[in-house]
C-alpha cells in the first residue's frame, strides 16, 4: 500500500506541477487523516484551502483511481484580534465538491481550476502577526471582562519563543498568562503562581479569577 500511496502522490505532483510551482506548494498526505492529500509549503506554514478527499479504490490497482474522489474546501479566514496588528485564524466547517466522474486528465484539470480559484492560507504560529491557536483566543475572550473590571491598564498580547501571552497590570503588579503546549501558566511579577494542564478555557479563566481574589484586587470604582 505504501508504494501505491507514493505513486499517487507522484501523479499529483506531475499533473499539477505548473500550478503548484506557481503557488510554491507541494502535495502531502494530510497528517491528521493520513489518506487525503493536502497542499503545503516546505515548513507547513502555508496551506491551501483545497484538499483532495480520496476513496478506498484510490489505494487499489484501479484503471481510474481518481474517479469518485472529491475536493474538500476549508472555510478558514483571518480576523483582527483587536490588539495591535494581531490577527487570528478562524476555522469554520469544510464543504465538499461533487465527486469527480471524468477520466484522470479531466479530474486534474478541475483540481487545477480549484487550486487557482481558492486561496492559500497562512496557518500555524510562525507568522509574526498571526495567531493560529483557538484555545488562546477563547481564553482571551473569556477573561477580557474580568480584567477590564479590575484595571484600566491596557491588555496586550505577545509571543516570545513560541509562547503566547496575555498581559496586563493591576497597580504595581504585572500579570501574564502564558499559553503553550496545551498548558496555561499564570505569572505575576515574573513569578509563576499557578498553572492549568490539559488546557481547558474555564479552568484557566478560574485560575486568573482566583488569584485576583486572593490578592484582593478590587473592581474599578470601589
Image (cartoon, rainbow, N blue to C red):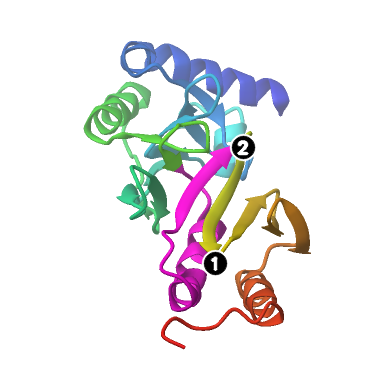
Residue drawn where x is 41% and y is 68% of the image = 152
Seen from this angle, which residue lies furthest front? 172
Residue drawn where x is 33% and y is 55% of the image = 82
Please provide percent x and percent y for residue 156: 45, 52
Q: Which residue is mark 1?
A: 170
Query: In the image shown, does 160 or 121 lie closer to the viewer?
Result: 160
Up-down relation of residue 38 to residue 42 (above or below): below
Label 2: state its secondary structure: loop
Q: Is residue 65 visible?
A: no
Q: Is residue 85 visible?
A: yes
Please provide percent x and percent y for residue 86: 38, 44
Please provide percent x and percent y for residue 153: 44, 62
Q: Residues within 10 Å of mark 2 (few under 14, many from 20)?
A: few
Q: Which mark is residue 200?
A: none
Q: Which residue is mark 2?
A: 162
Residue drawn where x is 32% and y is 21% of the image = 105
Q: Which residues are magenta?
A: 131-160
CA gap, disc 1 and disc 2: 25 Å
Residue drawn where x is 71% and y is 25% of the image = 2
Amino acid at each position: 500500500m505504501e508504494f501505491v500511496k507514493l505513486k499517487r502522490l507522484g501523479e499529483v505532483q506531475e499533473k499539477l506541477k505548473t500550478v503548484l510551482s506557481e503557488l510554491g506548494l507541494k502535495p502531502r498526505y494530510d497528517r491528521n487523516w493520513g489518506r487525503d492529500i493536502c497542499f503545503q509549503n516546505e515548513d507547513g506554514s502555508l496551506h491551501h484551502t483545497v484538499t483532495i478527499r480520496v476513496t478506498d479504490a484510490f489505494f487499489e490497482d484501479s484503471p481510474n483511481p481518481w474517479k469518485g474522489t472529491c475536493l474538500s474546501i476549508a472555510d478558514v479566514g483571518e480576523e483582527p484580534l483587536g490588539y495591535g496588528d494581531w490577527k487570528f485564524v478562524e476555522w469554520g466547517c469544510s464543504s465538499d465538491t461533487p465527486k469527480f466522474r471524468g477520466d484522470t486528465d479531466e479530474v486534474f484539470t478541475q483540481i487545477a481550476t480549484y487550486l487557482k480559484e481558492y486561496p492559500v492560507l497562512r496557518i500555524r504560529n510562525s507568522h509574526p502577526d498571526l495567531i493560529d491557536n483557538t484555545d488562546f483566543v477563547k481564553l482571551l475572550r473569556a477573561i477580557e471582562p474580568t480584567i477590564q473590571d479590575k484595571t484600566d491598564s491596557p491588555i496586550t498580547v505577545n509571543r516570545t519563543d513560541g509562547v503566547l501571552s496575555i498581559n496586563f497590570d493591576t497597580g504595581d503588579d504585572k500579570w501574564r498568562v502564558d499559553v503553550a503546549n496545551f498548558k496555561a501558566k499564570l505569572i505575576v511579577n515574573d513569578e509563576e503562581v499557578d498553572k492549568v494542564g490539559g488546557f481547558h478555557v474555564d479552568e484557566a479563566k478560574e485560575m486568573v479569577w482566583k488569584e485576583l481574589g486572593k490578592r484582593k484586587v478590587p473592581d474599578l470604582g470601589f
